[in-house]
Image (cartoon, helix red, strand yellow):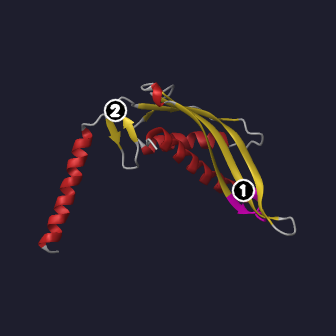
Amino acid sequence: MNKHQIKNIITKGACVLVVAFLMQGCAIQMTFDGASIPENVRTASVQTFDNRAPYINPVLSQTLTEALKDRVINGSRLILAEETGDVDFSGEITGYETEPLAIQADAVSAETRLTVRINVRYENFKDPEKSWESSFSAYRDFPSEQNITAIEDQLVSEIVEELTENIFNKAFADW
């Protein structure tokens, strides 16, 4: 390395340290995944998502609830409250369905889509104006010749990951 490259590395490192130092004094904590959580918000709670879909996957409620708890814990500095936290997530699963896609000339579908729909209520007890209620949905397509029971767990896992990411971003990333 030459002097110019070393100087650039030192300058960039110093800038990162200055920004980190300045952020320590801010009223909003920024995390590296884009979350901005006010300092006065310290706890979060996630209520069990009731399954009110016409077709019920028996483990989806527990899977979604636990995944959202994990996303909040791992994506922020918030502590999970036993009862109701400074912010609270609740809601219900409103849809769990498959539908044929890409109907071919012989009236057989080439693909099938699994869709999960949920309704989420986010209550911010420290700043009620930031509370909201919103619907989210996510889907995955799979070849129709595959038996859904063979791949359902994997599809649900991917869908739940997308849903929890979208919920987290709406609550904490100001998107």
* Label 1 to label 2: alpha-carbon separation: 41 Å
Question: Within 10 angstroms of label 1, few (less than 14), some, or many (20 or more) residues?
Answer: some
| Quadrant in which residue 68 is drawn | top right
Task: Tell me the quarter of the picture where residue 77 sits.
Answer: top left
Q: Which mark is residue 113?
A: 1
Residue shown at 14%/70% (left/top)? 4
- Name the secondary structure under disc 1: strand
The residue lying at 64 percent from left, 40 percent from top is: 118
Q: Residues within 10 Å of mark 2 (few under 14, many from 20)?
A: few
Q: Is residue 61 left or right of residue 170?
A: right
Q: Quadrant of residue 94?
A: top right
Q: Amino acid at mark 2?
A: Glu
Q: Classify residue 16 as left or right of residue 172.
A: left
Q: Which mark is residue 128?
A: none
Q: Which mark is residue 39?
A: 2
Q: Can residue 95 be found in the magenta stretch?
A: no
Q: Relative to 167, does residue 111 appear above or below in the rendering?
A: below
Vertically, is 156 above or below 83?
below
Of 27 and 86, the residue lying toward us: 27
Q: Position of residue 79 (x, y in %)?
A: 42, 34
Q: Which residues are magenta?
A: 141-149
Q: x, y percentage for residue 78?
A: 41, 36
Q: Any magenta on residue 147?
A: yes
Q: Which of marks 2 and 1 precedes in the sequence?
A: 2
Q: Residue at x 18, y 55 (%)?
A: 14
Helix, strand or loop at mark 2: loop
Report the side of 123 relative to 1 (left or right): right
Kind of residue indicated by mark 1: Arg
* Residue 170 x/y as whole percent: 50, 41
Q: Toward the viewer: 162 or 57? A: 162
